[in-house]
Amino acid sequence: MLQFIPSALIVLRFLLGLLLLLNALDGKTDAWFILGFVAAFLCDIFDGVIARRLGVSTAGLRQADSWADRCLYLCIAVSTWLVHPEVLMAFKMPLLTVVFLQLIWWVVNLLKYGQPASYHTYTAKLWGITLFIATVALFGSDRAGIALWSAIIVGGVHTIEEIGMTLLLPQWTHDVLSIVHARRIGQQMQNTVV
């Protein structure tokens, strides 16, 4: 029974993202938005921790975790458009730059592996933290500023690192912590083939 806890937390995060979007549909949010987002963030932290402790951290589970993250932050982005469109307009170019980098990431991964990567890098974790801070700042106090700039910069660095990792790794691999790890794993894979 315990082995299903990580999967349940991933499903819960997906559902919480949809509930956050539902909360923002009328152009405003309440305290439940922040509470739901904090719960989703905690689910994101603990699904991986629990999966590793229980020994059930599979490639499929890690991919589902990545999809739940994408869904959650897509719901946050749409919620931001509904509640704080002025922030998106003020940060239009930096945000579009990160979106463009993410599109390049998608194309590179789909061309090379036929599916998105699921690396769960240190920079991904840092990006998640900066997105958490920026989201709480924006929806909790109507301020974005430095928190959003931090999320944008870390998101750009993270995406560029993962593009580089995909270029280094000869085959799809999950849970690669950094480009240094990717280089080492890529060399080991090539040595194994030779």
Image (cartoon, rainbow, N blue to C red):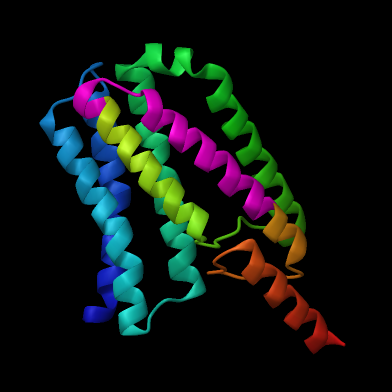
Query: In the visual, does 71 lie left or right of 110?
Result: left
The residue lying at 25 percent from left, 71 percent from top is 5
Kindly give the residue lying farthest to the left in the view shown: 31
Kindly give the residue lying farthest to the front in the view shown: 146
Query: Residue 189 in the image: x percent, y percent?
Result: 75, 81
Q: Is residue 15 visible?
A: yes
Question: Where is 86 relative to 180, above or below?
Answer: above
Question: Where is 96 relative to 108, above or below?
Answer: above
Kindly give the residue lying farthest to the right in the view shown: 194
The residue closer to the viewer here, 78 or 100, is 100
The residue lying at 40 percent from left, 40 percent from top is 73
Main SS, magenta region, reads helix
Q: Quadrant of residue 85?
A: top left
Question: Where is 91 relative to 42, above or below?
Answer: above
* Number of numbered discs on residues: 0
Query: In the visual, does 36 lie left or right of 129?
Result: left
The residue lying at 32 percent from left, 57 percent from top is 44
The residue closer to the viewer here, 52 or 116, is 52
| Residue 149 is inside the magenta segment | yes
Query: Residue 163 in the image: x percent, y percent?
Result: 68, 51
Quarter the N terminus occupies: bottom left
Question: Where is 183 relative to 192, above or below?
Answer: above
Q: Is residue 72 visible?
A: no
Quarter the C terminus occupies: bottom right
The residue closer to the viewer here, 146 or 107, is 146
Query: Residue 41 in the image: x percent, y percent?
Result: 28, 50
The residue lying at 55 percent from left, 62 percent from top is 119
| Residue 51 is inside the magenta segment | no
State which region is magenta: 139-163
